[in-house]
Amino acid sequence: MDKIVSLCRRRGFVFPSSEIYGGLGSTYDYGHYGVLTKNNIRELWFKAMVQEREDIVAIDSAIILHPRVWEASGHVSGFTDPLVDCRTCKLRFREDQLGVSACGRKPSKHPGEFSECDLTEARQFNLMFTTHVGALEDESSLAYLRPETAQGIFVNFKNVLQIARRKPPFGIAQIGKAFRNEITPGNFLFRVREFELMEMEYFVPPDDAARWHEYWIKERYDWHVKYGLRESQLRIREHDASERSHYSSATSDIEYLYPIGWSELEGVANRGDYDLTQHTKSSGTKLEYVSDGGERYVPHVIEPAVSIERIFVAMLVDAYDEEVIAERERTVLRLHPAIAPVKAAILPLIGKNDDMVTRARSLYDELRRRHVVEYDDGGAIGRRYRRQDEIGTPFAFTLDKQTLEDDTVTVRDRDSLAQERLPIAGVADWLDDALERDWRSPKAD
Ligand code: ATP
């Protein structure tokens, strides 16, 4: 993980937040390449979950909802983690993670295992951030920053049912920031207090829920594989009853083998009719489906939920590679081309040759209308390639003396390092095609 963190910092993917004030623990800002990568992840999720489907529509609800939403959903009373303090080292731990946490005095041991450890009894700690709406700061103005986007979907169930004229099975998808006051954030972006959730609530007839649960586990697993994660690093793990959230009747995690061990990448929960029933009781508005024939039922809900942050870390970890080529080391991010922040680099071999530079800039202008590409004429060509390898740019187009004679360029493949010559006029279409091709990681599976 240290190598990923330092690459992200060095190449401007991710910076510690508020750094000039000493940083705010486990809070990060995204730089240029980080923003581009996140945009790609977000767009590809949206494409698969909404654009390419007839049965799913989008929504963008508020971050601060009516506080009664969170009472009805069970978050005010039940969205808690068990908190344990150590009176000796003053650190705080999640009781359910003591076995994977390090003792403050003796990091080789777990909290509670060292003779000086003095742990308190566990108490429940609510993970929701509170705030106040309006000028008065009292109980009546108390509000919460959403810890999940799902509730903004449930409270809009009736709107969508009527206005988008849907009937089960159908889904509502949402992408947006979520906030959790995690007791033990850390491991870079894996557990942060502010993250971007991508959630989809899929409403189905109750008898079909188990089948749709299986369907969505497979769909989402396949999406991660399609965008480059190696299957050897992925697995599906079913929660046992003690692990499930307060709303869930069954949950399976898609886990990735992060450097911290197998951990949840994405959760696929069967929320049953819990949320719609709770909001019906609490609001007095019936959240149910009535068929044309008059049949009524409360749909059950299948929910795939994943943060961009956990995908981002998994993809960078999976892509990171070091190798020695002609006695020189290179660091390369073998990202799926659709995920890579920059799709191609345009490199005039001789940065001082006006003719070469003019042609390179004109190719750059043509390509940037279609894709995020970079122009670079500074320094030795080998160093320019390595700069692009490090940020995962899949293709580099190099213009050289021959270009001036026959209007061809070389294209270099980031993974195989193979080079071929192409007519400059065909580069834009070639790149479109290359970015559409299926891609599998060349790293050993
Ligand atoms: P964990 O057990 O790791 O705390 P959870 O089971 O509470 O996670 P869910 O409520 O299922 O998590 O959240 C859905 C998804 O949101 C997770 O699969 C993960 O992708 C993401 N996620 C949850 N908490 C965080 C966080 N603190 N930072 C980044 N992503 C998160």
Image (cartoon, grey):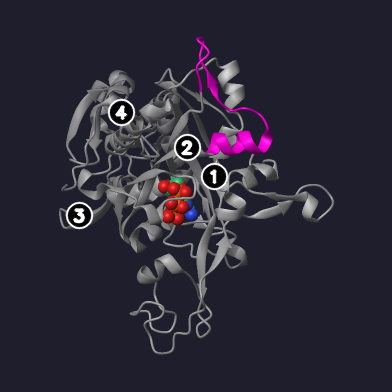
For the point 33% across and 40% down, the residue is 393
Q: Earlier in the sequence, mark 4 or mark 3?
A: 3
**Of 244 and 201, the residue lying toward us:** 244
For the point 38% across and 83% down, the residue is 106
In the picture of the structure, the residue carrying the numbered disc 3 is: 323
Mark closer to the observer (1, 4): 1
Q: Is residue 276 magenta?
A: yes
Identify which amino acid the numbered label 4 is placed on.
Answer: Leu
- Dot 4, crowdedness within 10 Å: few (<14), some or many (≥20)? some
In the picture of the structure, the residue carrying the numbered disc 2 is: 199
Q: Is residue 376 magenta?
A: no
- Dot 1, crowdedness within 10 Å: few (<14), some or many (≥20)? many
In the picture of the structure, the residue carrying the numbered disc 4 is: 435
On screen, residue 230 versus residue 346, left or right, reads: left
In the picture of the structure, the residue carrying the numbered disc 1 is: 148
**Where is the N terminus found, in terms of image quarters?**
bottom left
Q: Are marks 2 and 4 in contact (CB under 8 Å)?
A: no
**Of 377 and 164, the residue lying toward us:** 164
x%, y% of residue 306?
43, 43
Residue segment shown in magenta: 275-296
For the point 43% across and 59% down, the residue is 188
Q: Earlier in the sequence, mark 2 or mark 4?
A: 2
